[in-house]
Amino acid sequence: MRIFAFETYEEMSRHAAAVMAAEVRENPRTVLGLATGSTPLGMYAELGRMCRAGEISFRDVTTVNLDEYYGLTPDHEMSYRYFMEKNFFSLIDILPENTHLPDGTAPSPAMECQRYDRLIDSVGGIGMQLLGIGHDGHIGFNEPADQFVPGTNYVRLTEDTIRANARFFASEADVPRYALTTGIRAIMQAKKILMVVNGAAKAEILCRALFGPITPQVPASILLLHPNVTVCGEAPAMAMIREKFPTAIEK
Ligand code: GLP
Protein backbone atom coordinates (compact mmCIF):
# COMPACT_ATOMS: atom_id res chain seq x y z
CA MET A 1 0.00 0.00 0.00
CA ARG A 2 1.28 3.45 -0.88
CA ILE A 3 0.02 6.36 1.21
CA PHE A 4 0.51 9.95 0.08
CA ALA A 5 -0.43 13.05 2.05
CA PHE A 6 -1.02 16.47 0.48
CA GLU A 7 -1.32 19.87 2.09
CA THR A 8 -4.35 20.92 0.07
CA TYR A 9 -7.40 19.32 -1.50
CA GLU A 10 -6.29 20.68 -4.89
CA GLU A 11 -2.89 18.98 -4.65
CA MET A 12 -4.52 15.73 -3.60
CA SER A 13 -6.95 15.94 -6.51
CA ARG A 14 -4.20 16.65 -9.02
CA HIS A 15 -2.12 13.71 -7.82
CA ALA A 16 -5.09 11.32 -7.85
CA ALA A 17 -6.00 12.52 -11.35
CA ALA A 18 -2.43 11.86 -12.48
CA VAL A 19 -2.60 8.30 -11.10
CA MET A 20 -5.84 7.61 -12.98
CA ALA A 21 -4.55 9.34 -16.12
CA ALA A 22 -1.47 7.07 -16.06
CA GLU A 23 -3.74 4.03 -15.93
CA VAL A 24 -5.75 5.27 -18.93
CA ARG A 25 -2.60 6.07 -20.93
CA GLU A 26 -1.07 2.67 -20.16
CA ASN A 27 -4.30 0.78 -20.85
CA PRO A 28 -6.52 2.88 -23.14
CA ARG A 29 -9.23 0.19 -22.96
CA THR A 30 -9.15 -0.04 -19.18
CA VAL A 31 -12.25 -0.48 -17.05
CA LEU A 32 -12.49 2.19 -14.35
CA GLY A 33 -14.53 1.53 -11.25
CA LEU A 34 -15.85 4.95 -10.26
CA ALA A 35 -17.16 6.53 -7.07
CA THR A 36 -19.43 9.41 -6.15
CA GLY A 37 -19.32 11.64 -3.06
CA SER A 38 -17.76 15.05 -2.69
CA THR A 39 -14.16 13.82 -2.38
CA PRO A 40 -13.50 12.87 -6.04
CA LEU A 41 -15.00 16.10 -7.46
CA GLY A 42 -11.64 17.89 -7.73
CA MET A 43 -10.05 14.88 -9.36
CA TYR A 44 -12.88 14.56 -11.89
CA ALA A 45 -12.57 18.27 -12.73
CA GLU A 46 -8.82 17.87 -13.26
CA LEU A 47 -9.32 14.83 -15.53
CA GLY A 48 -11.88 16.89 -17.46
CA ARG A 49 -9.32 19.65 -17.90
CA MET A 50 -6.71 17.16 -19.08
CA CYS A 51 -9.16 15.70 -21.57
CA ARG A 52 -10.11 19.12 -22.97
CA ALA A 53 -6.41 19.97 -23.27
CA GLY A 54 -5.88 16.80 -25.31
CA GLU A 55 -3.60 15.28 -22.68
CA ILE A 56 -5.77 12.18 -22.26
CA SER A 57 -8.68 10.41 -23.93
CA PHE A 58 -11.42 8.19 -22.49
CA ARG A 59 -12.72 7.15 -25.91
CA ASP A 60 -11.97 3.46 -25.37
CA VAL A 61 -12.49 3.39 -21.61
CA THR A 62 -15.39 1.62 -19.90
CA THR A 63 -16.67 2.68 -16.49
CA VAL A 64 -18.64 0.81 -13.86
CA ASN A 65 -19.79 2.81 -10.87
CA LEU A 66 -19.84 1.43 -7.38
CA ASP A 67 -23.38 2.18 -6.40
CA GLU A 68 -26.76 3.84 -6.90
CA TYR A 69 -29.62 4.83 -4.64
CA TYR A 70 -32.57 2.50 -5.00
CA GLY A 71 -35.74 4.22 -6.14
CA LEU A 72 -34.20 7.25 -7.88
CA THR A 73 -34.56 7.62 -11.64
CA PRO A 74 -31.40 8.42 -13.65
CA ASP A 75 -32.60 12.00 -14.25
CA HIS A 76 -33.25 12.61 -10.54
CA GLU A 77 -30.78 15.28 -9.43
CA MET A 78 -29.68 13.19 -6.46
CA SER A 79 -29.16 9.96 -8.37
CA TYR A 80 -25.60 8.85 -8.83
CA ARG A 81 -26.16 8.59 -12.60
CA TYR A 82 -27.04 12.29 -12.63
CA PHE A 83 -24.01 13.05 -10.44
CA MET A 84 -21.67 11.19 -12.77
CA GLU A 85 -23.06 12.82 -15.92
CA LYS A 86 -22.78 16.28 -14.40
CA ASN A 87 -19.44 15.96 -12.65
CA PHE A 88 -17.46 13.66 -14.91
CA PHE A 89 -18.95 12.07 -18.03
CA SER A 90 -19.96 15.43 -19.55
CA LEU A 91 -16.39 16.69 -19.01
CA ILE A 92 -14.66 13.89 -20.91
CA ASP A 93 -14.89 12.15 -24.28
CA ILE A 94 -16.22 8.84 -22.98
CA LEU A 95 -18.89 7.07 -25.06
CA PRO A 96 -22.20 7.11 -23.14
CA GLU A 97 -22.79 3.42 -23.88
CA ASN A 98 -19.55 2.56 -22.09
CA THR A 99 -20.68 4.07 -18.77
CA HIS A 100 -22.49 1.79 -16.33
CA LEU A 101 -24.20 2.15 -12.96
CA PRO A 102 -26.60 -0.12 -11.13
CA ASP A 103 -30.17 0.68 -12.18
CA GLY A 104 -31.97 2.20 -9.18
CA THR A 105 -35.32 1.75 -10.91
CA ALA A 106 -35.04 -1.99 -11.58
CA PRO A 107 -38.21 -3.67 -10.31
CA SER A 108 -36.27 -6.53 -8.72
CA PRO A 109 -33.19 -5.44 -6.74
CA ALA A 110 -32.02 -9.06 -6.55
CA MET A 111 -32.09 -9.49 -10.33
CA GLU A 112 -30.40 -6.14 -10.83
CA CYS A 113 -27.58 -7.22 -8.49
CA GLN A 114 -27.08 -10.36 -10.59
CA ARG A 115 -27.15 -8.36 -13.82
CA TYR A 116 -24.55 -5.94 -12.51
CA ASP A 117 -22.18 -8.71 -11.40
CA ARG A 118 -22.50 -10.32 -14.85
CA LEU A 119 -21.84 -6.95 -16.47
CA ILE A 120 -18.65 -6.45 -14.45
CA ASP A 121 -17.51 -9.96 -15.45
CA SER A 122 -18.41 -9.35 -19.10
CA VAL A 123 -16.19 -6.27 -19.33
CA GLY A 124 -13.32 -8.31 -17.89
CA GLY A 125 -13.35 -6.97 -14.32
CA ILE A 126 -12.03 -3.64 -13.11
CA GLY A 127 -8.60 -2.25 -14.01
CA MET A 128 -8.56 0.59 -11.52
CA GLN A 129 -11.13 1.10 -8.78
CA LEU A 130 -11.55 4.58 -7.35
CA LEU A 131 -12.83 4.70 -3.77
CA GLY A 132 -13.79 7.29 -1.21
CA ILE A 133 -14.54 6.25 2.35
CA GLY A 134 -17.68 6.86 4.38
CA HIS A 135 -17.56 8.18 7.94
CA ASP A 136 -18.38 4.68 9.17
CA GLY A 137 -15.72 3.06 6.98
CA HIS A 138 -18.02 2.08 4.14
CA ILE A 139 -16.76 1.65 0.59
CA GLY A 140 -19.38 2.01 -2.12
CA PHE A 141 -22.39 1.40 0.08
CA ASN A 142 -20.88 -1.64 1.78
CA GLU A 143 -21.88 -0.67 5.29
CA PRO A 144 -20.46 -2.00 8.58
CA ALA A 145 -21.91 -5.49 9.07
CA ASP A 146 -21.20 -8.88 10.60
CA GLN A 147 -19.72 -10.14 7.36
CA PHE A 148 -18.29 -8.93 4.08
CA VAL A 149 -20.77 -9.36 1.22
CA PRO A 150 -19.02 -10.57 -1.95
CA GLY A 151 -21.47 -9.77 -4.75
CA THR A 152 -23.45 -6.70 -5.74
CA ASN A 153 -26.06 -6.27 -3.06
CA TYR A 154 -29.16 -4.39 -2.03
CA VAL A 155 -28.49 -2.63 1.25
CA ARG A 156 -30.27 -0.61 3.84
CA LEU A 157 -28.17 2.46 4.54
CA THR A 158 -27.07 3.06 8.11
CA GLU A 159 -28.39 6.07 10.02
CA ASP A 160 -24.85 7.47 9.97
CA THR A 161 -24.72 7.34 6.16
CA ILE A 162 -28.23 8.77 5.81
CA ARG A 163 -27.21 11.67 8.06
CA ALA A 164 -23.90 12.20 6.23
CA ASN A 165 -25.57 12.20 2.81
CA ALA A 166 -28.50 14.41 3.88
CA ARG A 167 -26.36 17.47 3.04
CA PHE A 168 -27.03 16.76 -0.66
CA PHE A 169 -30.83 16.48 -0.21
CA ALA A 170 -33.51 19.00 0.77
CA SER A 171 -33.98 17.13 4.06
CA GLU A 172 -32.87 13.95 5.80
CA ALA A 173 -36.29 12.44 5.13
CA ASP A 174 -35.59 12.67 1.38
CA VAL A 175 -32.48 10.48 1.49
CA PRO A 176 -33.32 7.05 0.05
CA ARG A 177 -33.05 4.33 2.67
CA TYR A 178 -31.84 1.65 0.25
CA ALA A 179 -29.12 1.37 -2.35
CA LEU A 180 -27.51 -1.08 -4.75
CA THR A 181 -23.78 -1.49 -4.29
CA THR A 182 -21.00 -3.45 -5.88
CA GLY A 183 -19.80 -5.99 -3.34
CA ILE A 184 -16.38 -6.62 -1.89
CA ARG A 185 -15.41 -9.21 -4.52
CA ALA A 186 -15.47 -6.86 -7.53
CA ILE A 187 -13.61 -4.21 -5.54
CA MET A 188 -10.95 -6.65 -4.32
CA GLN A 189 -10.55 -8.17 -7.78
CA ALA A 190 -9.76 -4.77 -9.29
CA LYS A 191 -6.14 -4.81 -10.44
CA LYS A 192 -5.45 -1.47 -8.75
CA ILE A 193 -7.24 0.57 -6.12
CA LEU A 194 -7.03 4.34 -5.79
CA MET A 195 -8.52 5.86 -2.63
CA VAL A 196 -9.07 9.59 -2.11
CA VAL A 197 -9.80 11.03 1.33
CA ASN A 198 -10.16 14.55 2.69
CA GLY A 199 -11.37 16.28 5.85
CA ALA A 200 -10.40 15.89 9.50
CA ALA A 201 -13.64 13.98 10.15
CA LYS A 202 -12.19 11.01 8.24
CA ALA A 203 -8.86 10.88 10.13
CA GLU A 204 -9.83 8.22 12.66
CA ILE A 205 -11.77 5.93 10.34
CA LEU A 206 -9.02 6.15 7.72
CA CYS A 207 -6.43 5.08 10.26
CA ARG A 208 -8.61 2.16 11.40
CA ALA A 209 -9.21 1.16 7.76
CA LEU A 210 -5.59 1.24 6.66
CA PHE A 211 -3.98 -0.23 9.76
CA GLY A 212 -6.58 -2.76 10.85
CA PRO A 213 -7.79 -4.90 12.34
CA ILE A 214 -9.52 -6.25 9.24
CA THR A 215 -13.17 -6.43 10.13
CA PRO A 216 -16.49 -6.15 8.29
CA GLN A 217 -17.37 -3.52 10.90
CA VAL A 218 -14.90 -1.29 9.01
CA PRO A 219 -15.52 -2.45 5.44
CA ALA A 220 -12.58 -0.48 4.00
CA SER A 221 -10.19 -2.49 6.21
CA ILE A 222 -10.41 -5.34 3.68
CA LEU A 223 -8.16 -3.21 1.44
CA LEU A 224 -5.24 -4.26 3.65
CA LEU A 225 -5.37 -7.56 1.76
CA HIS A 226 -5.21 -5.94 -1.68
CA PRO A 227 -1.79 -6.00 -3.38
CA ASN A 228 -1.98 -2.64 -5.17
CA VAL A 229 -3.58 0.23 -3.25
CA THR A 230 -2.68 3.91 -3.55
CA VAL A 231 -4.18 6.29 -1.00
CA CYS A 232 -4.16 10.05 -1.67
CA GLY A 233 -5.16 12.02 1.38
CA GLU A 234 -5.42 15.66 2.26
CA ALA A 235 -3.36 16.46 5.39
CA PRO A 236 -6.26 16.76 7.91
CA ALA A 237 -7.52 13.29 6.94
CA MET A 238 -4.00 11.94 7.50
CA ALA A 239 -3.61 13.42 10.99
CA MET A 240 -4.04 10.19 12.97
CA ILE A 241 -1.89 8.11 10.62
CA ARG A 242 0.76 10.80 10.78
CA GLU A 243 0.67 10.61 14.56
CA LYS A 244 0.58 6.81 14.97
CA PHE A 245 2.37 5.52 11.88
CA PRO A 246 4.45 8.46 10.57
CA THR A 247 6.81 6.33 8.50
CA ALA A 248 3.91 4.85 6.50
CA ILE A 249 3.34 8.13 4.65
CA GLU A 250 5.45 8.72 1.56
CA LYS A 251 4.92 12.43 1.02
C1 GLP B 1 -21.26 7.88 -0.37
C2 GLP B 1 -20.78 6.96 -1.49
C3 GLP B 1 -19.36 6.48 -1.26
C4 GLP B 1 -18.48 7.65 -0.86
C5 GLP B 1 -18.98 8.24 0.42
C6 GLP B 1 -18.12 9.38 0.95
O1 GLP B 1 -21.86 7.22 0.67
N1 GLP B 1 -21.63 5.83 -1.66
O2 GLP B 1 -18.87 5.84 -2.43
O3 GLP B 1 -17.14 7.23 -0.72
O4 GLP B 1 -20.29 8.74 0.16
O5 GLP B 1 -18.55 10.59 0.45
P1 GLP B 1 -17.78 11.97 0.59
O6 GLP B 1 -16.64 11.88 -0.37
O7 GLP B 1 -18.77 13.01 0.18
O8 GLP B 1 -17.36 12.06 2.00
Image: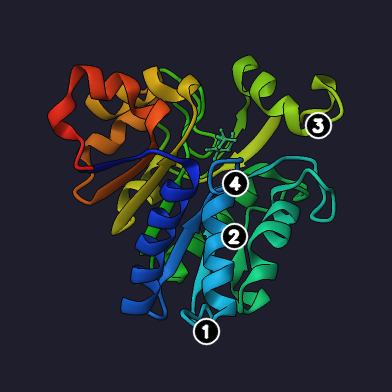
Counting residues from the N terminus, which is met first, the one under dot 1 or under dot 2?
2
Q: Nearer the viewer, residue 127 or 11?
A: 11
Foreground label between 3 and 1: 1
- 4 or 2: mark nearer the eye: 2
- Where does the image place residue 60, in percent across and percent down from the top left? 49, 82
Residue appearing at x 50%, y 26% in the figure: 143
Look at label 3 and name its amino acid: Phe
- Amino acid type indicated by mark 1: Gly
Viewer-proximal residue among 90 and 175: 90
Q: Are marks 1 and 2 in contact (CB under 8 Å)?
A: no
Q: CA distance from mark 1 to mark 2?
A: 14 Å
Q: Earlier in the sequence, mark 1 or mark 4?
A: 4
Q: Are marks 1 and 4 in contact (CB under 8 Å)?
A: no
Residue position marked by numbered label 4 in the rendering: 36
Q: Is mark 4 within 8 Å of ligand 1?
A: yes
Locate residue 172 relative to residue 130 in the image: left or right: right
Per the image, the residue denoted by label 2 is 45
Which kind of residue does numbered mark 4 sit on?
Thr
Residue 130 in sight: yes
Residue 97 vs residue 44: left or right? right
